[in-house]
Image (tube, rainbow, N blue to C red):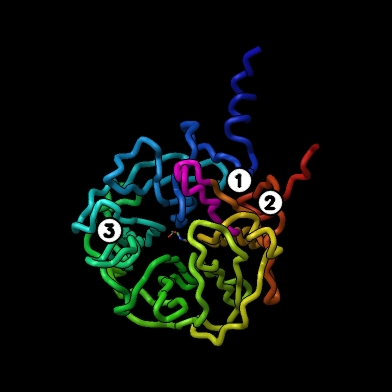
Amino acid sequence: MPLPATAKARQLHPAVIEPGLPWLDDRGKHIQAHGGGIIKLDDTWYWFGEDRSRDNDPEKRYVACYSSKNLIHWQFRHQVLALSDPENFGHEWVLERPKVYYHAMTRKFVMYMHIDGRLPGNSSRYSIASVGIATCDTVDGDYRYQRHFRPLGRESRDLGQFIDDDGAAYLIFESRPSHGFYIAALSGDYLDVSREVCFVPAPLEGGAIVNYDGLYYVLGSGLTGWWPNANQYATAKRLEGPWSNFADFAPAHTHTWGSQTTNLIKVVGSTKTTVIYAGDRWRPEEHWDSRYLWMPLEIGDGKLALPEPKPWTIDIESGETSIEEQHQ
Ligand code: DGJ
């Protein structure tokens, strides 16, 4: 018997986030926003990420944008970047982990992305190790590629985004020769990085930061390619450090429940502030089918834990979350 329309809609768009399951947009398609970044403008959240759709042109690299008012149901907005190799990087060129910043004065949207490819004579397709910039006048319009560079003159691979509570914008980037990652302040127009805020001597990628209850928490993953590992966190009173020692935030044998850090989303509700771990479960052989692992973190007093993934929901007004007990 066919499902009534409302039941079908509920099945397609449940009122819960189901970590690890295909997450469908308003069109019923698996969300393509891998290695993503999330920003909030007024009452709307925008999720940007790598669009790895199976039918994409293999010579191009794509970024998609989705929007939501509750972080559960996402509307596809636009493929905001469909870029042909802009600077003869070679056909194996790489665009990963796009993040968008909104500059309130210039009213420009500025996308940062990991741009890579083979340097002449180098066997690694990750040897260019740089950051690319694209800009747009609207949040979900066609972004225009501007240039690529090495931030602070350093090799840069995985990048992460952090916008502090005072609106200050930072780029986090992993730098292999330094055996660690940098936190850098963006320049006045956001089109560059202007200043090293901190170098953290821990070889971690997928960096993400949240400012929670007067303490900064940074997360990162070990350097094991697409394969998950035991991601770690540290804390500091100031972004400049000193940072505490790094520790696991999920049982080590689960390899962060099979995921890799990408982003931390802070939801300040009327009764609770919730911090969501947004991670990727990569499927490198079937990139289009890579999944998302989003869970509310147990956070406070310098401690951080990622609970076992289960379906859960959030009330965006209050910030309260509830985790569903699964029925066998
Ligand atoms: C791990 C990174 O986090 C991903 O973004 C990607 O660069 C893979 N490595 C490539 O192996």
239 or 85: nearer the viewer: 85
Is mark 2 in CB contact (under 8 Å) with mark 1? yes
Residue drawn at (19%, 58%) of the image: 87
Amino acid type of disc 3?
Ala
Residue drawn at (33%, 77%) of the image: 154
User: Which numbered marker is on residue 309?
Assistant: 2
**Residue 58 x %, y %:** 30, 43
Magenta range is 277-290
Q: In this rendering, does residue 169 appear at all?
A: no
Residue drawn at (29%, 40%) of the image: 57
Number of numbered markers: 3
Q: Secondary structure at mark 1?
A: loop
**Residue 144 x %, y %:** 23, 54
Q: Residue furthest top?
A: 1
Name the quarter where the N terminus is drawn: top right
Q: Secondary structure at mark 2?
A: loop
State the residue position of label 3. 134
**Residue 75 x %, y %:** 46, 39
203 or 307: nearer the viewer: 203
Amino acid type of disc 1?
Gly
Mark 1 or 3, closer to the camera = 1
User: Ligand 1 within 8 A of label 3's CB?
Assistant: no
User: Which numbered marker is on residue 282?
Assistant: none
State the residue position of label 1. 20
